[in-house]
Amino acid sequence: KNEVEQSPQNLTAQEGEFITINCSYSVGISALHWLQQHPGGGIVSLFMLSSGKKKHGRLIATINIQEKHSSLHITASHPRDSAVYICAVRIPGNQFYFGTGTSLTVIP
Amino acid sequence: DTGVSQDPRHKITKRGQNVTFRCDPISEHNRLYWYRQTLGQGPEFLTYFQNEAQLEKSRLLSDRFSAERPKGSFSTLEIQRTEQGDSAMYLCASSHEGDVYYGYTFGSGTRLTVV
């Protein structure tokens, strides 16, 4: 019944690996956000997407509006990338629905 | 510091007590949001202000919860007669109406533990 589904829920990778986190949603959206949450709880907004692809450093986010799907890729992963990554969709009217997050651990 | 500030970072309270949290948004942001996050879950929307007007409230926001933003700047979230189920991280975020490029800025949250 969740409007936003993320996979995988947990992910462990070796340093240097290419990582993909997926997000599927079932509602009409005005934008999709990828967020990063560290163990202390603070949340950082990584990307806001309404179409196409965005890149920031080693992070790449893509969205396919027709398929209602987005992916977050991390290239050359590093232990400092270890965090929970949350997909959030903004619906018209300005409310957000959040995924439950993907917990990423990158092992040196 | 130009980010979103939340105070306190941690709060431990006894069941039945009232607690109040504060959020100071980025000064140019006219929209302010409160979310609640329980362990293992994504944040859940509680309420949202545009300037001083509270425009939307989730039904999660029971009558024990009240939020204000009296001058359109900082906001407070009060929980009366706290219950153990209120234990969660309370997150605040702000944005500027019409800012379609930078999305939201989140605070670090206030972690509430009700014992």
Image: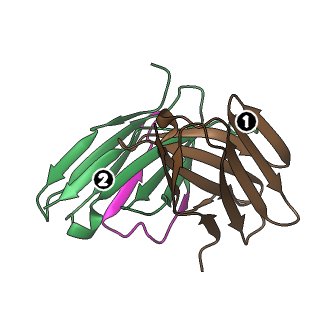
Disc number for residue B99: 1
Which corner quadrant of the image does residue A70 belong to?
bottom right
Q: Which residue sits at x=81%, y=49%?
A: A50
A35 and B28: which one is in front? A35
Q: Position of residue A12 (x, y in %)?
A: 50, 52
A44 and A16: which one is in front? A16
Q: Name the magenta segment's main secondary structure.
A: loop
Chain drawn green in the picture: B
- Circle 2 packing at 10 Å, graded few (<14), some (14-19), many (20+), is some
| Residue B52 shows up from this direction | no
Q: Is residue A66 left or right of residue A15?
A: right
Which corner quadrant of the image does residue B109 belong to?
top left
- Placement of the N terminus of chain B among the 4 image quadrants: top left
Regarding mark 1 in the picture, which secondary structure is present there? loop
Chain drawn brown in the picture: A
Q: Which residue is mark 2?
A: B78
Q: Is residue B97 left or right of residue B21?
A: right
- The residues colored magenta run B56-74
* In this view, B28 is above or below A76: above
